[in-house]
């Protein structure tokens, strides 16, 4: 036996301890690959599906001016410009608007209708009521149609409020209002109540020259003014008008404005506030306005506070003045109150008094 040959026992042991050979892959099948079905093809390769398309020829219907209580009947035309049947699944109205009927199915290339009503009872002024259509149009699953109108009340007031800017002691300013009824040419104004005793109202039928264009020929005219004892300041009042209209026997008209004196300071008081090291404000400026017809002069302007001096500068001759108050550096500490007294050439208002106050330190 050669010296290089292994003993049979050693050879068997070596074979037992050797690692196992890796598994070989199964033989490749010779069968052809399965064909891809049409259902598994990419979506881009599929033909587009037919679809309906809703076109509303006039989605907004404007009825213009209508009398309150009128019932508006409106027909909307619905066109299907697609290539599949259009389904109107529902029509959802807004408050006050009801759908009478509509075509539920509209063939391709055909038109249908939506009949709607709008009841104007309880409405006033410009209104817009919409109806929402629910459809099978993939591009417009919801669509709107709208009914618009300008609803006139049973009794109309133009303007709807009275406004007066009055200068005390001058001739009274007058606010004029016209009142009429679209459905009751025999309307009567039976009385007017004001919320203050110094508000005066005259009610009468308008003359031919006073009639407001575009309104019925039977109109009433209210002339609102203030008596001389009307207090100074802003106006915030109301007029209660009683009418013969069975559906609107009363209507309320607001009254606003202002009553000014002939000579009016702005602001109404010279308030220095707190004056100290951190707020060294020792100067105050106010304006005096002349709202009267005649020009005035300021003859003097002084205060009853020894440490406050006054300088007057005309900004518009006879109409507007700048009044500057200067606090002296040695003004006593503590709270002070006094009066600025301005003497003028106005016979109606020869003296104007303005409060002066503040605190030093």
Image (cartoon, helix red, strand yellow):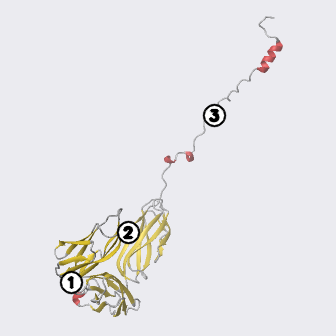
| Quadrant in the picture for residue 210 | bottom left
According to the image, label 1 marks what residue? Answer: 350
x%, y% of residue 220? 29, 90
Of the image marks 2 and 1, the number of the one nearer the N terminus: 2
SS of the residue at dot 1? loop
Of the image marks 2 and 3, the number of the one nearer the N terminus: 3
Q: In the image, what residue occupies the spot 34% across and 64% down?
A: 279
Marks 2/1: CA distance? 69 Å
Is 135 in front, or is 287? 287
Res. 24 visible in picture: yes
According to the image, label 2 marks what residue? Answer: 58
How crowded pointer 3 is (Cα within 10 Å; few <14, some 14-19, many 20+) is rated as: few
> CB atoms at circles 2 and 3 under 8 Å apart?
no
Is 299 in front, or is 233? 299
x%, y% of residue 230? 30, 87
Is 6 in front, or is 103? 6
SS of the residue at dot 3? loop
SS of the residue at dot 2? loop
Q: Looking at the rendered structure, which numbered label has been put on residue 31?
A: 3
């Amino acid at each position: 036996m050669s010296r290089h040959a292994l003993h049979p026992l050693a050879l068997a042991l070596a074979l037992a301890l050797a690692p196992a050979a890796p598994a070989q892959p199964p033989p490749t099948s010779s069968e052809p690959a399965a064909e891809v079905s049409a259902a598994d093809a990419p979506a881009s390769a599929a033909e587009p599906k037919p679809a309906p398309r809703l076109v509303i020829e006039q989605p907004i219907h404007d009825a213009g001016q209508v009398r309150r209580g009128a019932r508006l009947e409106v027909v909307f035309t619905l066109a299907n410009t697609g290539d599949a049947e259009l389904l109107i699944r529902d029509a959802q109205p807004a408050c006050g608007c009801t759908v009478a009927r509509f075509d539920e199915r509209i063939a391709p290339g055909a038109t249908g209708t939506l009949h709607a009503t709008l009841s104007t009872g309880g409405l006033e002024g410009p209104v817009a009521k919409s109806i929402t259509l629910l459809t099978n149009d993939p591009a417009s699953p919801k669509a709107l149609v709208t009914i618009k109108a300008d609803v006139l009340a049973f009794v109309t007031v133009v303007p709807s409020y009275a406004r007066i800017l009055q200068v005390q002691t001058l001739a009274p300013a007058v606010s004029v209002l016209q009142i009429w009824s679209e459905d009751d040419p025999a309307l009567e104004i039976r009385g007017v109540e004001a919320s203050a005793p110094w508000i005066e109202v005259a009610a009468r039928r308008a003359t031919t020259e006073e009639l407001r264009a575009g309104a019925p020929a039977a109109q009433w005219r209210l002339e609102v003014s203030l008596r001389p004892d009307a207090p100074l300041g802003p106006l915030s009042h109301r007029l209660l008008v009683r009418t013969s209209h069975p559906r609107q026997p009363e209507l309320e008209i607001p009254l606003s404005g202002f009553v000014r004196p002939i000579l009016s300071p702005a602001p109404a008081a010279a308030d220095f506030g707190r004056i100290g090291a951190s707020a060294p404000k020792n100067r105050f400026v106010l304006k005096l306005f002349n709202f009267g017809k005649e020009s005035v002069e300021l003859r003097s302007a002084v205060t009853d506070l020894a440490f406050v001096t006054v300088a007057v500068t005309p900004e518009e001759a006879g109409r507007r003045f700048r009044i500057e108050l200067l606090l002296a550096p040695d003004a006593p500490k503590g709270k002070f109150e006094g009066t600025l007294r301005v003497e003028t050439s106005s016979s109606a208002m020869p003296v104007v008094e303005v409060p002066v106050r503040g605190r030093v330190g």
